[in-house]
Image (cartoon, grey):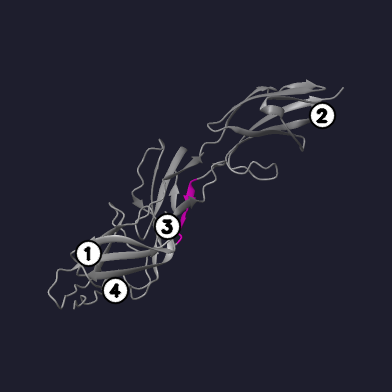
Amino acid sequence: MNNPPTKPNITYPINASTLEKDTNTSSVQINWTSSTDPDGDSIFYRVYALYDGLWHLIGETSNGTVYWDVSGITSQQNVDLYCRACDGEDCSDAYNPDGALIIDNTPPTAWSNIDESKVYGSPFTVELYASDNVGNTTIYYCVDQSDTCTPSTLYDGPFTVDTEGVNYVRFYAEDDVGNTGSIMSNVLKVDLTPPIITVESPEGGKTYYNKFTIKINVSDNFGIDRCYYTWEGVTREIPDCNSVTVYGPSGEGELNVTVYDVAGPVSYTHLRAHETSLHLVCRLLLE
C-alpha cells in the first residue's frame, strides 16, 4: 500500500495581498514547505492557481519554488493557489491560507492641473496626480522645452515652472507592484513679456478737426488678445488691433491706447495678465 507525501504548506504569497511581480519578468514567486514521503519515494510538486473562474496548472517542479508569469492575465481579485505533493501514485493537497490574492496588471493613470489651452502670464505651480485600481502610486517627472527629457525626479509636491516660453512637463506614475503608466507630456506656456505697441497716428500735440484716425502696430511673443482706446472718458475697442476713426467727443486731453496679450483670462470682463498702454495728448475740434 502506497502512502502519500506529507502536505506542503504555501509560505508565499499568503493572506490578502497584491501579487508582487518581478519587474523584469512579470513573474510571481511562489514558495512552499518541503514534503516528505513515508515510503521514501521521490516527490514532485504541482502548483495550481484559481483565476478567471478556473483552476490552472501554473508549474511543476521537484523543489519548493515556482515562478508564475502573470503578465497575460487580466487584473482581478480573489485569486487562490494550491500545491500538490505527489510521489507518482498519490498526492496531498495544500491550499493558500487566505485565498484572496490580487493580480494587478493595470497601470496607474496620471494627470496634471495644466490647461494646455492657456498661456500663463506668471510662473505656474504644477500639481501632479495619479490613481490606481489597487494601491499606492509614485510619480516621476521632468521639465524641458524640447519634449525629450526622461522623467526621473520624484514628485513630492507642487513645483513652479518660471521659464518663459513653451515648456513640456513630462511625467508618469508607477504602482506598488511595478505597473508603469505611459509618459504624459503637457504643454505649459509661460509668458512673462508684455506686448509691444507703436502708434502711427494721431500725432501727439496736434489739433484735428471733426475726426482723427488711430493707427497702431502691435506685437507679442505669444499673441495679442484685444486693443482699446480711451478718449474723453469713452473706451472702445480697436477692431483687429489695427485702426479706428474717432468722431468725437470734442476735447483736448489724453488719448490712451491699451493692448492686452493672450496670457491669462481672455474673457472681455476679466483683467489680462499683461497690458501695454501708450498716452498721447491731442485736440479734437468738431466744426
Judging by the rendered image, the residue that carries numbered circle 3 is 157
Distance Cα–Cα, label 3 vs label 2: 56 Å
Residue 93 got which mark?
A: 4
Distance Cα–Cα, label 4 vs label 3: 50 Å
Q: Residues within 10 Å of mark 3 (few under 14, many from 20)?
A: few
- Could you say which is closer to the camera, residue 152 or residue 237? 152
Closer to the N terminus: mark 3 or mark 1? 1
* Amino acid on which the number 4 mark rests in the picture: Asp
Closer to the N terminus: mark 1 or mark 2? 1
Which is in the foreground here, disc 4 or disc 3?
Answer: 4
* Amino acid on which the number 2 mark rests in the picture: Gly
Distance Cα–Cα, label 4 vs label 2: 99 Å
Kind of element beneath mark 4: strand
Closer to the N terminus: mark 3 or mark 2? 3
Q: Residues within 10 Å of mark 2 (few under 14, many from 20)?
A: some
| Residue range (magenta) | 123-133
**Whole-percent x and y of residue 226?**
66, 34
Distance Cα–Cα, label 1 vs label 2: 93 Å
Work out whether 123 lies above or below 145: below
Residue 65 got which mark?
A: 1
> Image quarter for residue 163?
top left
Kind of element beneath mark 3: loop
Which is in the foreground here, disc 3 or disc 2?
Answer: 3
Task: Quadrant for the C terminus, please.
Answer: top right
**Whole-percent x and y of residue 94?**
29, 74
Which is in the foreground here, disc 1 or disc 4?
Answer: 4
Q: Are marks 3 and 1 in contact (CB under 8 Å)?
A: no
* Amino acid on which the number 1 mark rests in the picture: Thr
Which is in the foreground here, disc 3 or disc 1?
Answer: 1
Task: Name which residue lies at 70% across and 34% down.
Answer: 228
Q: Residue furthest front?
A: 1
